[in-house]
Image: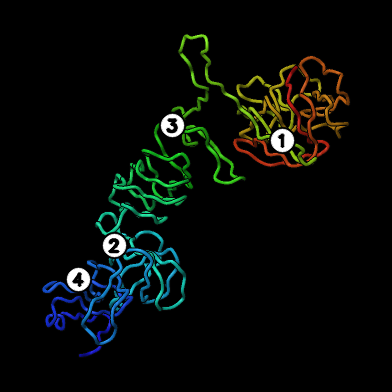
Amino acid sequence: MGTAAPGYCLKSALKKNPRLLPTLDREHADKICRAPSTAVIAATTDTSGIVGITISGTTGTNTTGNAIIAIDGLVSCVFDGAMTGGDYVQISSSTAGNCHDTGSGTYPTSGWQVIGRVTSTNASTGTFTLKMGGGSPADGSGGLSGMTASQVPIAASATTVTSSEPLAGAGAAITIGPASGVTTLDVAEFTGTGGQIANSGTLLSSLAGLGTSNTWTASQTFGNIELNTTITGVAAATNVSIEAGLGTASSGGAVGGLFEKGSDNSDTVSATIAGYHISRCGMLTAATPNAAALEGVCQSVAGYLKGSAVANVGDVVCGTTTAFTVTDCATTPGTNIVGIANATSNPIGVIYAGTALVKLDGALTAIGDNVCMGTTTAGLAHDSSSTTTACTLGTSIGVIIADSGTATQSAGAGTGSTAMSTTLVLVQLHIGQ
C-alpha cells in the first residue's frame, strides 16, 4: 500500500476490515467518512465536519488498528505556518490535515471550522499545542456548557447567552467578546471562587445573576443596577468617574442629572433611621504617614463663565451683573465672593466648598494662617500672617493647610494635577465668613 499521507482517505483499505477505525498520522485533523463509518484525515476542501485531532495510532502505511482522537483539552497539531498565542485555529485550506492560525484572537465568523486556540507563539511550521473547544455556540461545536477556559466566544447572531451547566473555575475570568447583537447575559449558573465577568465587546443592556465581584474593562450600558456594598477601580491608581447622561450636547433639551442620596425609611418605629450619605476624600491611613504625604482634595464645584478677567488658577472670583458669570474680585473687596477659580478660560469651575489651591499676593508666612481677600492685586488672596486674627467680615477665604507637593483637583470641567508653591497654597475654604 502507498503511504498514508495527510489527507489520504483510507476508506478502500478499511472496507476490507470494516470493524476497525483506521490508523492515522497522529496530530492531524480528522473527520468521519460514511459507508463504512471511518476516520480520515481532513482534506483541504473540507470546511466543517471535523471530529478532532489524532493523538494515538500507528503512522505510515499501516491501515489497521484503532486511532484515538482528541475532541477537547490541550492537544498537539501540525500547523501549516506561523502562529501567535491566543489566536483562533481553523482547519488548513493549504495542507490536508493541518491546523491553521487565523491570525486573530477574535472569533472568525466565516471560513473553515474552528478547532481551538493557540497556546504559544511560534515563527514557523511545526507541531505545537492548541486548546481545543473553540467552536461557535451557533454551530453546536462549542459554547458555554461546562467550559473552564478564559475565553467564551459568542456568535454574532446571538441575542441571549445562557449557561446550561455550571462554568466552574477557581478565580477564572470569563471574557465576552466580540458580542455584536448580544443584549442579555445570564450568568446565574456560572460558578467559581472569585470568578469575574469581563466584557470587551458590544455593550450589554441586561445582566442577570452577577457574582459579588465583577470587572468591566470598557464602557457599559445598564438599566437599574443593584450593588453589593462597593464600587472600586480595577487597580490601586485607577480613577473612577460616575456621570449622569452621556456628557454630550443635547438637541435642544436637558441632559441627564445625578441624584445621590442615602436610602429613605418610611417605617414608624422608634428605631427608624434613614440611610446616611457621606462624601469623604481619600485619607492617609498609616499610623505615621510620610511628612511629604498629602491628604486627598475634597471639593464642591459649580460651573460659571468668565467675565472681564480671571488671571490665574486659584484666583478669588466674585459675582457680576451677568448670570452665571464671575471675574477676579477687586482689590477693594466687597462681600460677593463666589469661590476659587479652577481655570482661566471657559468653562470655569468655581470651587465654593472643601479644599482648593488659592493664589496669594505674596509668599505665605506659615501653614495654619488665615487667608483673606487681598488688597493689592485683583483676584489674589492674602496671608494674614496670623492664626488668631479674623478677616474683615465677608472677605474670609480660609486656612492654609499645605504649601508643597502636587495636588489633584478640579480643572475646568475635568480634573488636573498642579504643583503647590509658597504663592499657590492649599486652603481649607471658609468663603465669605
What's the residue at 20%, 80% (across, down)? Answer: 9
What's the residue at 71%, 35% (across, down)? Answer: 295
Instruction: Find out whether the residues at labels 4 and 2 contact each other: C-beta distance under 8 Å.
Output: no
The first of marks 2 and 1 along the sequence is 2
User: Is label 2 or label 3 in front?
Assistant: 3
Check the picture and name the quadrant holding the N terminus: bottom left
CA–CA distance in space, label 4 to label 2 = 22 Å
Horizontal side of residue 195 vs 69, given as left or right: right
Horizontal side of residue 345 vs 261, given as left or right: right
As rendered, which of 312 and 169 lies closer to the eye? 169
Note whether residue 206 is visible: no
Q: Secondary structure at mark 2?
A: loop
The amino acid type found where label 1 is placed reads: Glu
CA–CA distance in space, label 1 to label 3 = 31 Å
In percent of width and height, residue 4 lies at: 25, 85
In percent of width and height, residue 344 lies at: 68, 35
In percent of width and height, residue 287 lies at: 74, 36
The disc label shown at residue 295, or none = 1
CA–CA distance in space, label 4 to label 3 = 50 Å
